[in-house]
Amino acid sequence: MSNIEFTRNYTDHSTNQGFQFEFYCDRCGTGFRTHFQASALGVVSGVLDAANSFLGGVLGKAADLGERARSATWEKAHDEAFTRAMEELKPDFVQCSRCSSWVCRKSCWNTTKGLCKKCAPDLGVEMAAAQASRTVEEIWAHSKVAQDDREMLQEKSWREGVRATCPKCNAPLAAKTKFCPECGESIQSQAHCTQCGAKLGEGMKFCAECGAKVGS
């Protein structure tokens, strides 16, 4: 018997009646399910269970005695079924020599490069994705700015600074305003230099930071 591969990326759907497995691509996660393989041992066990029930448990002890042999036999049959399932789906998978991932040939294998598409992406696909992403960025960058926000973006507003909260009651300020809508406190009580944005003390005629004339 050949060595058993795919020991990680699969789900076992086997029952007492037979064997079935589902293998997954390491890159896209797509599942590939094998055909159901009926278990002769499961069929015999089902017949014995039915007969035992019909005869009121007379076969119970015999069934218990055979359970240990059945378990070993079932495990052997299970391994053989898994190997057949692996061979059935192996043509649909390929292992990348760079990252050792098992990926599906259909969607995740770069035939030209001989590597999975995680290690060697399709350049055409990546270019199309990059162009689409850039287009979206351009749309957002050139979207129309609301008039209220346009005022906020003027250079003068940036230089003067804009408060997010009232200095007295800490109420949030949704926009640049002269007075707090909650307590009426003057928001512009602290003057700023229109050139560098530095705070200006009361009565100052020139900015102490840049020397600009106050009120110019």
Image: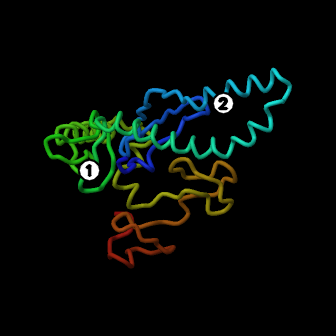
Q: Give the structural element (helix, strand or loop) at label 1.
A: loop
**Where residue 7 sits in the image (x, y, percent)?**
44, 50
The numbered disc on residue 96 is 1
Task: Quarter of the image for the C terminus: give it.
Answer: bottom left
* Above or below: residue 107 compared with residue 185: above
Which residue is at the front of the view, 52 or 165?
A: 52
Q: Quadrant of residue 50?
A: top right
Residue kind at label 2, given as amino acid type: Ser
* Above or below: residue 197 compared with residue 70: below
User: Label 2, label 1: how many angstroms apart (C-alpha)?
Assistant: 42 Å
Q: Is residue 208 left or right of residue 57?
A: left
Could you tell which of marks 2 and 1 lies nearer the N-terminus?
A: 2
**Where residue 102 sits in the image (x, y, percent)?**
33, 47
Q: Measuring 21% from the left and 36% from the top, which residue is drawn there?
A: 128
Residue kind at label 1, given as amino acid type: Cys
Which residue is at the front of the view, 194 or 117?
A: 117
Q: Measuring 63% from the left and 41% from the top, which residue is drawn there?
A: 70
Which residue is at the front of the view, 11 or 29?
A: 11
